[in-house]
Image (tube, helix red, strand yellow):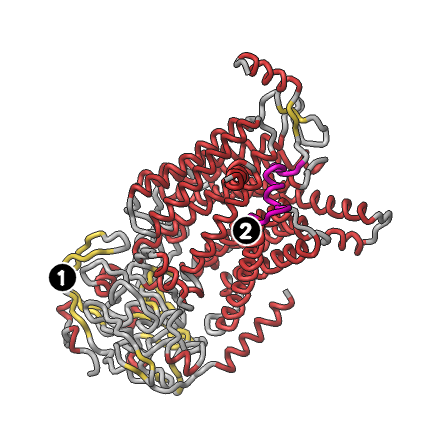
Amino acid sequence: MKFIKVLIPFMILASFVFAKEEIEYVDSGVNPDIWITIPAGDFFYGQHNHVKTTVEYEIMATHVTNQQYAKFLNEAIAQKVIYVKNDTVWGFHPGDPFDAYLHEFEIPAGDYPLVPITVPGLRLNYSNGKFAAKNGYDNHPMVQVSWFGANAYAQFYGYRLPLEIEWEKAARGTDVRPFPWGNHIEKNRANFISSHNLFEKMFGDVVKTTPVGFYNGETHNGYETLDNRSPYGLYDMAGNVKQWVGDDHKYVHYRYMRGGNYNSYELYLRVWVRDSAGPEHTSMSLGFRCARNPVMAVETAPADSIVNE
Amino acid sequence: MKKINELYHYFFQSTKGLILLAMSAISVITAIWGTLSGPMVEWGVRDIVVGILGMDLTSVERSGRIIMIYHVIAMIVVSIEVYMMTSIIPMRKHQQTTINATVTVGWITAMVFGLTFGYFGHNYFYHGLFLVGQSLIFFAGILLAAAIYPWKREYLVTNDDYAHTKNGYDYERIAFFVMTVAMLISAGFGAVTGSFWSNGHETFLAEDLIREPGKTALQKSIIGHLHIMLTLIAVAITLIVGRWMDWKGKLHKVGMPLMIFGTLVISGGVWSVVWTRMAHTFIYVGSVFVMLSALMLVIYAWGKLIRDRIAEQGIENPTFFQKFAALLHDPIKFGPFWQMVFMNFTVSGVGIFMAIKLEEIFRVWPAREERVTLTGHWHILSAIIATIIIMYYVDISGIKGKVRKWFGWTLIIASDIAFAAVTIFSMKRLFVTEYAEQPLVNITMLLTDFGLGAILVITGGLFFWRLMDLFKKDDALWEKEAIDSELAINPTAEMTQEGRDKIRAQMEREGL
């Protein structure tokens, strides 16, 4: 026990010493502002390939980046939609239906934490009332954001978080592949535990996220990647960081996450695998992307036109 | 030809040979299938093994494959326990022969065709034969229950030191019987659900259901099935090593009724999980009784180790340190009971902690973290049972001297390092933030790999030695074991004169 008591503070200290607050910017060549149209129709849902149907919708080609989220925070704070208090960004949530089911927590209307500002691993700086992405992290996925924080971003711009069914269709297409790009996984196809990607090599274990769209078949600073786009052209639907989805399922307070992350073994990268946590949960390996209905579309692109814009 | 016949006799008709055969099978499976996950994947070993053996690892079918490998290994472990039971519980020779033969054909059939079905294509002919193998093991279980039926006048306790009823019925035999019947019913729990879902269309792993609201009755029974089977395997090995240590006296007299009652309550609690939310309460209550009984065994076993060693040394008034040295003198006999104590930190303690902190911590963390803790918890229990079986087997093999000490201490220390590391890893969020976790993850993973690697190396060495022994021309151990094939124990009960008269009368009736 003594050994553990000594070891753990040492390791925490070591992590801070080696932590990289600023890193070299690597341009993946993928534009995070691109939206992709997913057509209406049937697809195979889940491990057991149940046929389900969606209407047409649009979804972001990549995760929301630190730069995009910092912009949202500054705009929303300026409009007094959200506010900063006690080192945390807060926003209003109208509450969820409560069924008083076993292990279900009630989530009543109220203000909830969106982003803890001082938590280690957040790649945003906050000074003089303004948020900005830390150097080099601009195009990395926004992390340390709660479900409320992800939902607030989507709501602010008139979007929404994708439903699980929408997320899975966008990842899988209309066949029964287990991974967004096909049936097999290679180390340099996605950011997962076996990848040991450029950023881990350059900056050590603490920097584990990769820029959105990093695995696009290009070679970045000598690191050769394979293209991990889904059949519809979405990047990182497996690996990098997990993604909040929007569903509020009956009988549970949990919110669900899809896609696996940089610490996941390959089995967790399969398109039907889910994770869940309370909506206030934040993590260095958890971000999100948004969806929207076609009627809201402003600018969309066909799947094959979004690389290297 | 003569040697082949002798080897056949040894491997398929002697208790020690049957145990060696089954343990070797598990070792080979572990060595090959262990390359399909964890660091072996990153090192590229998996791809090589898959390529050489022509395995079919379709991603969508992983759950089904895991179910097959769990069942195959569990079947062999259960068979090893059956071999041990038929050797140490008094029964007629023909009963032992029939049970051992049935269970052996069962596990070999289940192993060969279960793994073939799971990993080399999905020919349902193989799945059928896998079920045949499992059914044979089930049938052997029924034969075993009949053979050790405790309320027979033939097997009464003849030594008052062993726990018994007023009429002389053997409490230890009752404990074995209750465990066996509970296991048969619990196997049925799994069989019914497996049949309902037949053909593997909707396979799932229990750990993936942890946060599913409104689980179906069948899902609950699957969860109950795997928990109770592992629990009963643990109860069985506890009873077996109790006999190995010749557990008797006051602690036996108190411990045995506790074990019987606890086994009944836990089993009833698990079976009731389908219908009542009170199931967990029953399970907790039953666990207290089983664990108290195990504690009494530990106290007895350690006391016996100290007394025997001190007597061997001829020390009349031993000091505390002399007693302590005596306790640690033989790691192979100290180890199983130490592992039972250690289990409380890595399995029972974690389980109780999770139950207490369920809503406060575990249901707040991501499901993946909760899943890691749960899977770590039962993998450790399985591995602890495995180490206990290995230690018993080292004793059976008659390994003595420095090799025995080195083997024993390496097994204890390496396994405990690995289990402790896995426990700390699985509960790391209690100690360290995600941001600072990497050094802890690296160290715990390294310690786990070191511990498990060391166990694999020494166990590999043990089986290599046994393999080489098969080719020895003179003084081969297996030849001695083929003759002296039963486990050396003091039986709690012996066949009474009434029993012997009954057999004689029956033989006369049959003209034998």
Image: magenta residue range: B470-489
Q: Please tell me the numbered disc located at residue A57.
A: none
Chain letter, disc 1 residue: A
Q: Which residue is mark 1?
A: A40
Q: Position of residue A144 (x, y in %)?
A: 39, 72
Which residue type carries mark 2? Leu
Above or below: residue B92 compared with residue B212: above
Pointer 1 and pointer 2 on the same chain: no
Q: Is residue A62 left or right of residue A206?
A: left
Quadrant into which the C terminus of chain B falls: top right
Q: Which secondary structure lies at badge 2?
A: helix
Which residue type carries mark 1? Ala
Q: Is residue B57 left or right of residue A295?
A: right
Does A130 lie within the magenta span?
Answer: no
Query: Residue placed at 38% from the left, 66% from the top?
Result: A264
Can residue B348 be seen from the camera position used here? no
Q: Position of residue B306 (x, y in %)?
A: 76, 48
Q: Which residue is mark 2?
A: B467
Q: Across the whole image, how many numbered discs are drawn on residues?
A: 2
Crowd tier of the residue under label 2, counting other residues whose Cα lies within 10 Å: few below 14, some 14–19, many 20 or above: few
Residue A243 picture quarter: bottom left
Crowd tier of the residue under label 1, counting other residues whose Cα lies within 10 Å: few below 14, some 14–19, many 20 or above: few
Above or below: residue B266 compared with residue A307: above
Above or below: residue A94 compared with residue A33: above
